[in-house]
Image (spheres, rainbow, N blue to C red):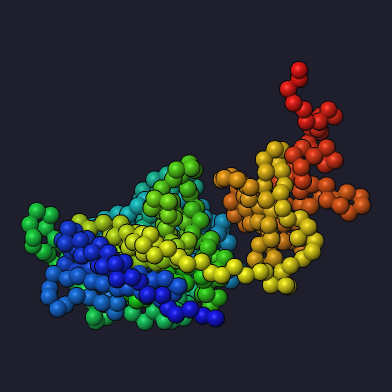
Amino acid sequence: MTSEPEQLLPSTRRALMHRIATAQSEGRAPSLVAAVQREGEILWSGSRSCVDGHAPDGDTQFRIGSLTKTFTAVLVLRLRDEGLLNLDDPLEKHLPGTGVGDVTVHQLLGHSAGLAAESPGPWWERTPGTLRPELTDVLGEQTRMHIPGHRHHYSNPGYTLLGSLVERARGTSWEQALRSEILEPLGMRRTGSQPEAPHAGGWAVHPWADVMLPEPAEDLGLMAPAGQLWSTTDDLLRFAAFLVEGDDRILCADSVEEMRVPAAPAGSGDWQSGYGLGLQVVRDGDRTLFGHTGSLPGFLAALWISVEDDVAAVALANTTAGLAIGEVAAGLVGIVAEAEPRIPEPWRPLPESEVDAGLLALTGPWYWGTRANVLRLAPGGGLELAPMHGAGRGARFVAGDDGTWTGLDGYYAGEVLRVVRNDDGSVNHLDLGSFVFTREPYDPAAAVPGGVDEGGWRGLGD
């Protein structure tokens, strides 16, 4: 049984339109177009313009700036998935002679390679790429700002290197690889490196007067993988659906999920933003969003996705500054998620093929010392370990050929879970990275490190 495509309530649609109308008016943008998607379907789109009768729609191209980086990252991860490189490979192995070849592919993807934020010389976003014909022109003399791997430092030249890496590996241009490997399979016919009508013109708006100045739209040359693309709200929401579920023609679901894991997180429990592999990850209140923002002279762009709420929103404007485009797109996600919470799928039992009697016997409470945890069967034949109450350490696990289980995420990512049995085959305990989990708190029958006091549990003496 399938349900009819979801329709937004009139009050929600009005709130969305009010949000973008306010943003265009207060941000003094010549035009702004936005759209919201749920369950892979565009539920709402709207636009505002300073010229009556000429508002953009879902087919109007805008320049998307650094949102281009997400496409470049997908191309690199395709190379990894095909076995042509490893993310911990030094750049020199695949693109020799750059002078920064000791940085890794992973560091470049997550902006932790320590490279400069911008290219030297004249403002690269407003000058033709012919001024930077070689990678040495993009990198300049002072290539290192920080020790590689020690901190997040956003780098446009870093993504230029990744684009050149794709070209070297594929034997074709970055643009051709992009078109054949991502745009064509996803049906993104209105996305490309050059504008095609209908498209918006880029404008700068004077900060203290209501007047405008046209911005140049230069071909960025070697810097194109960092910010060249033009796209539409319709196309970007096709891309958003891919970033949620994956597409085996491009990247599998596990690889796109990997992109959303912060590569160099802040490390504290109250982090508000991070950067994965070509994707920004931010917290908006209690909601986690991933996607990317972008800007080039004359244009602003933002794409945010909430997996939990199954909502994606994109906003595009043709102004250089003055409008918080990331906040606009995040606000659109929030309006739909809060006004019309996601209706969960019906509960269904696991397929019979995924129910193993031996694994089923392992489910239920397990104790690390006195801390209660629960082990559950997961879809796909995996296991999930989580605290019984509140937050804490947990992970999903996938089975290995040797009878062990390896953590996929969380605190135990990469750690090995073993089922330790007695001579008669009964389970003694679970060993997870040397941590012993027992069926009862400090079970005296289990191999608890340090042993269990023979007197057992006791109360306060008289």
Residue 307 is at least partly visible in this image: yes
The residue positioned farthest toward the front in the image shown: 462
What residue lies at 42% left-to-right and 54% top-to-bottom? 287
Residue 371 image offset from top left, x and y in percent = 67, 40
Front residue of 280/103: it is: 280
Task: Please identify the quarter of the rendering in which residue 302 is found.
Answer: bottom left
Residue 222 is at least partly visible in this image: no
Residue 418 image offset from top left, x and y in percent = 76, 52
Front residue of 118/371: it is: 371
What residue lies at 79% left-to-right and 52% top-to-bottom? 419
What residue lies at 86% left-to-right and 52% top-to-bottom? 426
Number of numbered discs overlaid on the protein picture: 0
Query: Which quadrant is home to the C terminus?
Result: top right
What residue lies at 92% left-to-right and 52% top-to-bottom? 424
- Residue 286 to residue 320: above or below: above
Query: Which quadrant is home to the N terminus?
Result: bottom right
Q: Is residue 384 left or right of residue 280?
A: right
Residue 96 image offset from top left, x and y in percent = 49, 61
Residue 6 image offset from top left, x and y in percent = 41, 75
Q: Is residue 91 left or right of residue 146?
A: right
Q: Is residue 344 left or right of residue 49?
A: right
Front residue of 24/64: it is: 24
The residue positioned farthest toward the top in the image shown: 462
Task: Please identify the quarter of the rendering in which residue 87 is found.
Answer: bottom right
Task: Please identify the quarter of the rendering in which residue 389 is found.
Answer: top right
- Residue 183 to residue 387: above or below: below
